[in-house]
Amino acid sequence: MDQSKDVKSTKGILNALLLAWIIAGTLDISSAIVTLIINNPNASILGLFQFIASGAFGDAAFSGGVPMAIAGLLFHYLIALTWTTIFFLLYPKIKLLSKNKLISGISFGIFVWLVMNLIVLRLSRVPQINLHTGHIVLGMLYLIFFIGIPVSYLANRYYARVMTHEEI
C-alpha cells in the first residue's frame, strides 16, 4: 500500500471538504444577515448570532453579549461543517447523488431544511418561531442555493477528479 497516495487522498478530500464548508457556511450566514437587515434595518446582527447560540444556551444567550454571539457564529459554522461532511461521506455511497449535481443540491438543501426545522430546532432551546409558507419557502431556497448546490457541486468536482485519477 502506498502511504503517500493515502496522505494525498486524505489531504485532497480535506481540502475539498473545507472549501465547501467555508463557502456554504459563509453564504448561508450572509443570507441570514442580509435578510435580517432587509426585514428590520434596526435589528442587531449580534442578536442574530445570539439567537443561534440560544439553541444551546437558551434565553441566557440573549444577555450574554459578544461571547454568546461568537458562540452562535461558531455553532453556525459547526452545523455547516456537519452538513457538508455528511454530504461528502454519502456522495460516493449513494450513486444517485452523482447523477445530477443540481438535483442532488436541491434535494440536499430541502433535506437539510427539513431536518433542521422539524427536528433539530424543535429539540434545541431556541425560541420557537411560527413557520408560515413564505418563511418555509425562503428558508428552503436559502439552503438549496447556499448549502445544497455549492456542496453538491464541490463534492461532484472532487469525486470526479478522484475517479478520473483512479481509472488511470
Image (cartoon, rainbow, N blue to C red):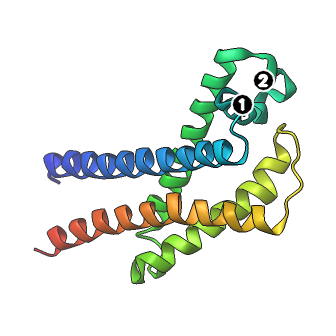
Q: Nearer the viewer, residue 104 or 8?
A: 104
Q: Residue 145: x and y, percent?
A: 51, 64
Q: Upstream in the sequence, badge 2 or badge 1?
A: 1
**What residue lies at 56% left-to-right and 39% top-to-bottom?**
78
Relative to residue 112, is residue 8 depicted above or below? above
**What residue lies at 75% left-to-right and 34% top-to-bottom?**
51
Q: Is residue 110 left or right of residue 100?
A: right
Type of amino acid at the residue the image marks with label 2: Ala
Relative to residue 145, is residue 50 depicted above or below? above
**What residue lies at 42% left-to-right and 44% top-to-bottom?**
22
Q: Residues within 10 Å of mark 2 (few under 14, many from 20)?
A: many
Q: Residue 58: x and y, percent?
A: 84, 29
Residue 81 seen anywhere in this rendered image of the structure: yes
- Image quadrant occupied by the C terminus: bottom left
- Image quadrant occupied by the N terminus: bottom left
The single residue placed furthest to the left in the displayed view is 168
Q: Nearer the viewer, residue 162 or 66?
A: 66
Residue 97 seen anywhere in this rendered image of the structure: no
Q: Nearer the viewer, residue 136 or 77?
A: 136
Circle 1: element type: helix
Residue with the mark numbered 1: 53
Q: Residue 134: x and y, percent?
A: 77, 66
Q: Residue 161: x and y, percent?
A: 21, 67
Q: Are marks 2 and 1 in contact (CB under 8 Å)?
A: yes
Q: Nearer the viewer, residue 166 or 63?
A: 63
Residue with the mark numbered 2: 61
Q: Quadrant of residue 137?
A: bottom right
The single residue placed furthest to the front in the displayed view is 41
